[in-house]
Amino acid sequence: MTDLLVPARFCGPPSSGNGGWTSGAMAELVHEHPHDHGQPWPPIRVTLRRPPPLDREVPATETDGVTTAADDEGPVADARRSETPLTEVEAVDAATARAAEASYAGWHSHPFPTCFTCGPDRAEGDGLRIFPGPVDDLDGTTRVAAVWTPHASTAEDWHTYEDEQRRASIPCTWAALDCPGGWSGDLAAYPSVLGRMTARIDALPVVGEEHVVVGHFRGREGRKSFTASTLYDVDGRVVATAEHVWVQVDPTEFR
């Protein structure tokens, strides 16, 4: 067991951690990762208890199958394996996803424009620059999509793969699944932060290869919204999938 540490690069709001990246870092503390990239990482559910601090180690402990990161101010997040099956979002082709980016609502109104995943103010190679725009309605609810080519700066370097290809890290893969869900629920109109995320990784995404990520809005209840996202590789295979719970906030309180 190691501590949770969110470097400032991986912010969501300017002063706190990106929810997806933080959740992925928590997932790393739960699961002993296989060295064979063909082995999937099982579904892990992460609940964020408060805005994750940046550049500060938060001690993590495990009790009865629950890994908790907490400091003197209280719990930051907890993580555990999940037995609940995840329903993947239906794919779209790369051309459709690429065209949808022109209609990304975050170009015009963004609660956190420096977000690691979807912030338009982040430079190439710094943020992920995933800009999901609407593609259609699925069962009467919104679906958004974008393309993403993992940059070398997202790579993890401690696994050996049979194909010798570099792959994005677990936290960066979770981050890629994060905001596309949120934008399917219209983050411009309903500014929100991630409250809970459950994700399964079938294979880490290959650095330098174009992927498609699709988000799906599944409902709203008071301040909470419910979404899902799925990441596909160049051949249309599922790389990873997630489901989320978002909580509407006043963005000025997170700056």
Image (cartoon, rainbow, N blue to C red):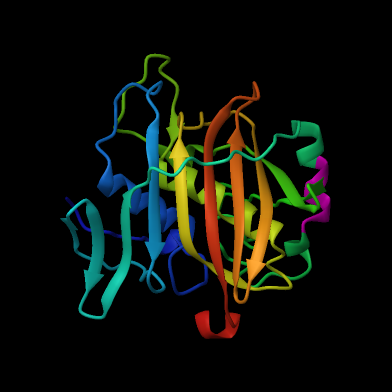
Left or right relative to 163: residue 104: right
Residue 168 drawn at (x, y percent):
46, 37
Question: Most prominent secondary structure in the magenta stretch?
Answer: helix
Residue 117 drawn at (x, y percent):
56, 54
Q: Is residue 171 magenta?
A: no
Left or right relative to 200: residue 180: right
**Looking at the rendering, which quadrant does residue 36 occupy?**
top left
Left or right relative to 214: residue 97: right
In front: 3, or 184?
A: 184
* Span highlighted in magenta in the image: 99-104
**Residue found at the very far top of the displayed protein:** 162
Count of marks placed on residues: 0
Q: In this view of the protein, can residue 18 be seen by the observer?
A: yes
Kindly identify the residue that appears in the image at 67 percent across and 61 percent down: 219
Residue 183 drawn at (x, y percent):
68, 59
Compared with 204, 74 (above or below) is below
**Looking at the rendering, which quadrant does residue 149 occupy?**
top right
Kindly identify the residue that appears in the image at 62 percent across and 54 percent down: 181
Compared with 177, 14 (above or below) is below
Compared with 195, 125 (above or below) is above
Left or right relative to 159: residue 177: right
Q: Is residue 101 magenta?
A: yes
